[in-house]
Image (spheres, rainbow, N blue to C red):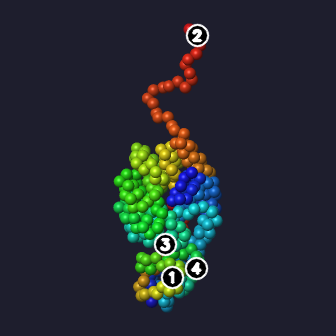
Amino acid sequence: MLTLYGQELRSRLLLGTARYPSPAVLEDAVRSSGTEIVTVSLRRETAGGRQGGAFFELIRALGVNVLPNTAGCHSASEAVLTAKMAREVFATNWIKLEVIGHHDTLQPDVFALVEAARILSAEGFEVFPYTTDDLVVAERLVEAGCKVLMPWCAPIGSAMGPQNVPGLRAIRAQFPDIPLIVDAGIGRPSHATTVMELGFDAVLLNTAVAGAVKPALMASAFARAVEAGREAFEAGMLEPRDFAVPSTPVIGKAVFA
Amino acid sequence: MKLTVNGEDHDLAVTTLAELLAALDFEGDWLATAINGELVHRADRSAHPLNDRDRIEILSPMKGG
């Protein structure tokens, strides 16, 4: 059982709600993923508009936990205000803290991230920081009050999969008691399995499902991939060897010549 | 009074944030509001006075990753 800020969860897959071809497809994908946490955002409502209300109703009807994000924020102060506005709307202390430092790579500004995490933790928020696999930054985030870390495995939306497996292993080894969620860069189920085999606690993805030809089917594939990786981690895997080892016993084999 | 609402300029005869929301036909329990970079809670909107050239943000839930 995964526990994030006191909330017990059976599913180890967190799903984003953006980029689906329609609200109905989103709903199907969420249900077939088995996820218990979806990410959402806040955007300017047009005067007289009801767009946000329709989306809000859809999300509420899903009956899952909501993790609002601060996507698109480029400074600590912007992210802090967005988090406060999200708490007002979604009535949760959870916040997926994103402070973007680079337009093209969407790499987090880890300095502003730590600053915002400290402010928000002090104000009672339960922060899920989108960060890199840098160990020192991770340490600072924990010091700032984060009890969950969400390192990327590749740039957002890139679908490249794990680019730095030794780095991911190191962060897992360094923080054995902190729930670690790989956020961003997952492209296919095998990527999710790989990071779960490394001992990560969960995976957050969006585009890999939303951009599939059949999003609901892909959501189901990811759900199984995440479970397979987790079970493999718990089961204990063989380490690769540079030589062959016969699996069938040699003793007792007939001698014909 | 000259106000900037979600980046657009308006000239409106309103005195509080609640009046502004009504004048621009915003409604619903899913909105979050901020004035000049500070959150204004839902419960404080009718008491919160507006000043000339205030910058108001009105946000609502949207899909996100």
What amino acid is found at the position of numbered circle 4 in the picture?
A: Glu
What amino acid is found at the position of numbered circle 1 in the picture?
A: Asp
According to the image, label 3 marks what residue? A85
Q: Nearer the viewer, mark 4 or mark 3?
A: 3
In x, y percent, where is residue A220? Answer: 61, 50
In x, y percent, where is residue A31? Answer: 63, 57
Which chain's residue wears label 3?
A
Circles 4 and 2, Cβ within 8 Å, touching? The answer is: no
Q: Quadrant of the C terminus of chain A?
A: top right
Which chain's residue wears label 2?
A
Element on which disc 3 rests: helix
What amino acid is found at the position of numbered circle 2 in the picture?
A: Phe
Residue at the spot x=57%, y=55% of the render? A9
> Vertically, is A235 above or below A95?
above
According to the image, label 1 marks what residue? B44
> Vertically, is A71 above or below B31?
above
**Frontmost residue, A174 versus A182:** A174
Neighbour tally class for label 4: few under 14, some 14-19, many 20 plus, Cα within 10 Å: some
